[in-house]
Amino acid sequence: MEVNKELIENIAKVARLNLTEEEKMSLEQDMKEVLDAFDKIQEVDTEGVEMSVQPIKIKNSLRNDKEKECLTQEEALSQTNHKQDGYFKGPRSV
């Protein structure tokens, strides 16, 4: 794909972006660099390599929930001055 000013202007139009000439030139250069990087990746010989979505095998990394003792409501509320009618009192939000 050839990256040029016309392509950048078309993308900007579709995205409804008002770009300056300097921004267009900068984006054109950035896009060329990104596409060049993809071209280099395409050159890698992957013949015989198994496709993988996740390159590192990860087993179930979640732990089982374990029931354990926690603070009572009274104990939790005893740790703050910001309480009202048995509940924590936070800042008003709209």
Image: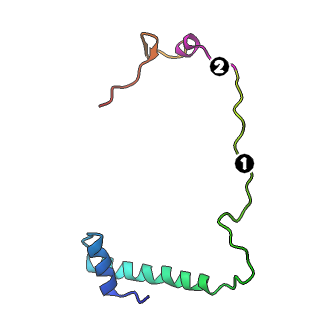
Taking the spot 69% from the left edge, 32% from the top edge, the residue there is 65
| Alpha-carbon span between mark 2 and mark 1 | 27 Å
Residue at which label 2 appears: 70
Query: Could you tell me which secondary element the residue under label 1 belongs to?
Result: loop
- Confirm whether the magenta stretch covers residue 8: no
Q: Nearer the viewer, residue 81 or 61?
A: 61
Task: Locate residue 16, reporting x and y percent.
Answer: 26, 69
In percent of the image, x 71 and y 47: which residue is there?
61
Q: Which residues are magenta?
A: 69-77
Colour scheme in use = rainbow
State which quadrant residue 11 falls in. bottom left
Badge 2 element? loop
How busy is the neighbourhood of tag 1: few (under 14 within 10 Å), some, or many (20 plus)?
Answer: few
Q: Which residue is mark 1?
A: 60
Above or below residue 64? Residue 70 is above
Residue 13 position, x and y percent, is: 26, 75
